[in-house]
Structure formats: C-alpha cells, structure tokens
Image: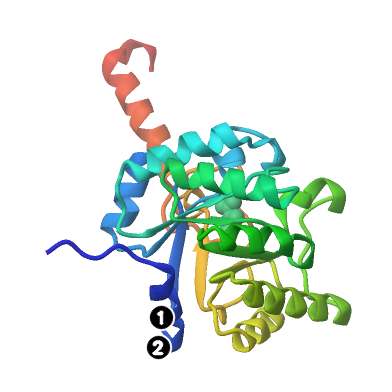
Amino acid sequence: MALAKKTPADFLAMKQRGERIPSLTAYDYPTARLLDEAGVPFLLVGDSLGMVVLGYPDTTHVTMPEMEHHVRAVARAEPRALLAADLPYHSYESAGDAVANARRLVAAGAQAVKAEGGAAILDQVRAIVGVGIPFIGHLGMLPQSVIEEGGYHIKGRSEIERETLLADARALEATGAFAIVLELVTPPVAAEISRALSIPTIGIGSGPDCDGQILVTPDLVGGFPWFTPRFVKPRRRTGEDIRAAVTESMQTVNPAAH
Ligand code: KIV
C-alpha cells in the first residue's frame, strides 16, 4: 500500500508526540527520489541552490524562474515527503507579489512556501495563508539579508535579539505559519522558542532542542567540498568519490597518461 503524502498537520502531530522531524534540501529529481526512498518526511527546495547548485556567491542572485525549474524537477520524483520551496530574494516585497509568486511555486509542484523574516513580512504571510497556501517562517540568520548584515551572524546572543526572535516567532505562529526554520540561533534561545510555540521549529545550526533539524544535503554528503558550515559534520565524502571515480575512469581510457 502506498504511504500517504505528508501534510502540515502531520508535522503538528509529530511535535505533539515529541517526535523529531528530519528534514533535508533537494534540488533535483534523483536526490529527491533518494531522500524520499530513505523516508525523509520534509524536503525543501531551498534558495541555497544558488550556492550549491548554481555557483552564485549567495542566495540574493536566485530568481523565480530558477526556483520554479528546480521545484519542477523535485516534484517529478512525486515524493511522499511534504515538498516546500523558498520564495527567493525580492519576490515577496508586497502581499500581492508574495501571493503571485507563492502560487507559481505551488503550480511548479510545491505544497508549501517559506520566506525569511518576522514582523516585517506579516502582511505577506497573512496573504499567502489567506489563499490557502501553507507557510513556513524563517528566523535567525537570514541568508537573503547577507549584504545588509555584512555576513552570516549568529542570532540570539543579546537580550534584545532574544526578545525579537521570540516575538517574531509568536507573531508568525499567530498569523498562520505551520512551522518555523531557526537558522544560526543560539541553542538556548532556539530551545526557548521551541517550547513557547505549538507549531514545530526546524533548526539549522541552532542546537539540538528544535523540533526538527534541516541540513543542506550537499553539506551532509560532502557534495560541495569547497565549503562546509562549521556546525555540519559530513557523513560521506561524495565529492571525493566523484574525483576518485573520474580519475580511475581516465586511467582506464588512457593508461599511458597516468
Ligand atoms: O535555502 C535553504 O536551503 C534553507 C535551509 C538552510 C533552511 O533555507
């Protein structure tokens, strides 16, 4: 019997049962199939694809057509996992833009969308949820703000940051988000937010006490060997496997050259 497709309600139920939510990014058909066959319940076509797939320096270069292209590829795997997609940089400046672009991602195959920010984007969140599209928040270090912030900084170290994060998380929940990604939030503050909310938090570099954990899949499997975030311990070295396979193959084709 085919297993049922995951829904936002499943994640709320997992939190209520105290069950953790393993989550990963996917940007293409084969990776989505592999992750889904392994039973990962939540897949995100993150705009991290800008760096780990498209070779941009940061996520601010990712466009809507690029997101749609990758969402379509992942959706062709027909994952049982809930498939979410990032609204890219400057695609949700107004409530109208947010809804139009969220609809495009849904038309490409996403079941939910994610956008970065708290109080500043509540009108956009309300509009997205209002047309029936499930929404995931993203607080803490916001990669789309890397230029304004002058780098990627841990959040939650000062009392004002702790209070702002907590208030933003509560506001997103009250506006209808069904989960919130917490990126590079200090572990005690991430734990406090996770306790304060009834919707699940999905942490990345935010300590062990979030309701779920998400990683950029190439970081997990060593698929982008030129950079690994400090908080990730790659479980495989697929980049090195590719180098070794290619070198062996070249030796077979042309032994004289080696
Ligand atoms: O873009 C992305 O992959 C993300 C995750 C790091 C949560 O937003």
Q: Residue at x 41, y 38 (%)?
A: 72
Distance of mark 2 from mark 1, alpha carbons?
A: 5 Å
Q: Residues within 10 Å of mark 1 (few under 14, many from 20)?
A: some
In this rendering, is residue 217 above or below 194?
above
Q: Position of residue 45 (x, y in %)?
A: 49, 48
User: Does residue 185 appear to the left or right of 103 in the view shown?
Assistant: right
Residue 35 visible in this rendered orientation of the protein: yes
Scheme by which the image is coloured = rainbow
Q: Position of residue 111 (x, y in %)?
A: 44, 55
Residue 203 visible in this rendered orientation of the protein: no
Q: Are marks 2 and 1 in contact (CB under 8 Å)?
A: yes
User: Does residue 141 appear to the left or right of 51 in the view shown?
Assistant: right
Tell me which amino acid carries mark 2.
Arg
Q: Quadrant of residue 208?
A: bottom right
Q: Which of these two is toward me, 26 or 102?
A: 102
Q: Which mark is residue 17?
A: 2
Which of the four quarters of the rendered structure image does ligand 1 lie in?
Answer: bottom right
In this rendering, is residue 33 above or below 70?
below
Q: Residue at x 47, y 47 (%)?
A: 106
In the picture, the quarter occupied by the C terminus is top left
| Residue on which disc 1 sits | 14
User: Does residue 185 appear to the left or right of 202 in the view shown?
Assistant: right
Q: Which mark is residue 174?
A: none
Q: Residue at x 35, y 40 (%)?
A: 29
Q: Position of residue 26 (x, y in %)?
A: 44, 48
